[in-house]
């Protein structure tokens, strides 16, 4: 981090001038930091699915469950390549919906001896999958946490599972508190308790920024590092 300077500095920025349009690398003017602000020199940036096509927070959900002491962590995805990635972050079981002729919630119930899971983290924001997630949790106490955003701003939720004592709630950035939580996360990354390197699957230079959005469509893409 550079020392605070009173001058305006010229930086490169990725800019989109209209919805659906291409992004461009342009020069912008950055004003000096104000009170309680800092100016930081960045060497790398990152892009993941949350930036373009909703959340695919699969590895983060698994890691969070592991750090909270979960004994059984079930990952669900149609992409078989996610199995290895999930195992690296602490997943104990993997379900590919294409391998079963029944609903996902029924399969999860079978994996847990008919009880269901205590918590289910839903990463897509798709209505049908949110309802499946709720059904996969325990009667009376199960909690489903939605962390993904689909294309629709509203969705139809089945009321019966909620009336039976289950809970559906949302979370933005995992409920992170910047002032108190970021130093803890930074320390865990420094100590390799959080394996950020396992998430990175591609690296591109800033000049090829539009290539990033094509790479995100690839089944083996999780997170892309952009070299500035």
Image (cartoon, rainbow, N blue to C red):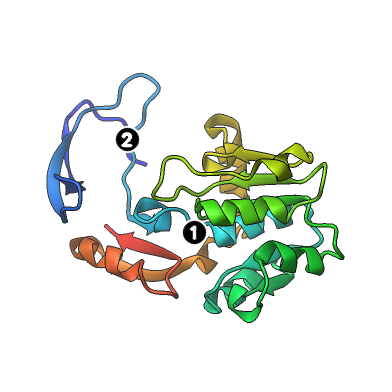
Q: Are marks 1 and 2 in contact (CB under 8 Å)?
A: no
Determine the CA span between mark 1 and mark 2. 30 Å
Between residues 47 and 117, which one lies in front from this camera angle? 117
Q: Quick check: 206 left or right of 58? A: left
Helix, strand or loop at label 2? It is loop
Tally of numbered discs: 2
**Residue 33 visible somewhere in the drawing:** yes
Work out whether 180 lies above or below 195. above
The quarter in which the N terminus is drawn is top left
Taking the spot 19% from the left edge, 47% from the top edge, the residue there is 19
Label number found at residue 107: none
Q: Answer with mark 1 or mark 2, whichever residue precedes in sequence.
A: 2
Name the residue tied to disc 2.
Answer: 39
Q: Residues within 10 Å of mark 2 (few under 14, many from 20)?
A: some
Name the residue located 82 percent from the left edge and 42 percent from the top edge. 140
The residue that appears at 80% across and 68% down in the rendered structure is 110
Picture coordinates of residue 210, whole percent (x, y): 21, 63
Residue bearing mark 1: 56
Q: Quadrant of residue 46?
A: bottom left
The crowding category of the residue bearing disc 1, from other C-alpha atoms within 10 Å (few below 14, some 14 to 19, many at least 20), is some
Task: Say if 35 sits above or below 157 in the image.
Answer: above
Element marked by disc 1:
loop
Asked if residue 89 can be seen in this view, the reply is no
Q: Residue 88: x and y, percent?
A: 63, 71
Residue 105 place in picture, x, y as percent: 70, 61
Q: Is residue 42 above or below residue 163?
A: below
Q: Position of residue 150 (x, y in %)?
A: 44, 50
Residue at the image position 62 percent from the left and 69 percent from the top: 86
């Amino acid at each position: 981090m550079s020392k605070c300077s009173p001058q305006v500095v010229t930086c490169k920025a990725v800019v989109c001038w209209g919805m659906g349009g291409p992004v461009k690398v342009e020069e912008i003017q950055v004003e000096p930091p104000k009170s309680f602000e800092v100016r930081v020199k960045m060497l790398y940036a990152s892009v993941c699915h949350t930036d373009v096509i909703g959340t695919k927070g699969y590895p983060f959900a698994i890691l969070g469950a592991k750090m909270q002491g979960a004994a059984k962590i079930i990952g669900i995805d149609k992409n078989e390549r996610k199995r290895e990635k999930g195992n690296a972050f602490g997943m104990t079981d993997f379900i590919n919906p294409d391998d079963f002729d029944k609903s996902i919630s029924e399969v999860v119930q079978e994996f847990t001896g008919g009880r269901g899971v205590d918590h289910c983290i839903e990463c897509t924001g798709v209505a049908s999958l949110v309802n499946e997630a709720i059904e996969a949790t325990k009667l009376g106490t199960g909690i489903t946490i939605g962390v993904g955003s689909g294309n629709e701003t509203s969705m139809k939720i089945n009321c019966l599972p909620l009336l039976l004592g289950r809970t559906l709630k949302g979370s933005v950035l995992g409920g992170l508190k910047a002032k108190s939580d970021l130093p803890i996360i930074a320390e865990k990354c420094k100590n390799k308790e959080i394996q950020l390197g396992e998430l990175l699957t591609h690296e591109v230079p800033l000049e090829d920024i539009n290539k990033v959005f094509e790479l995100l469509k690839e089944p083996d893409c999780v997170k892309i590092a952009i070299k500035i």
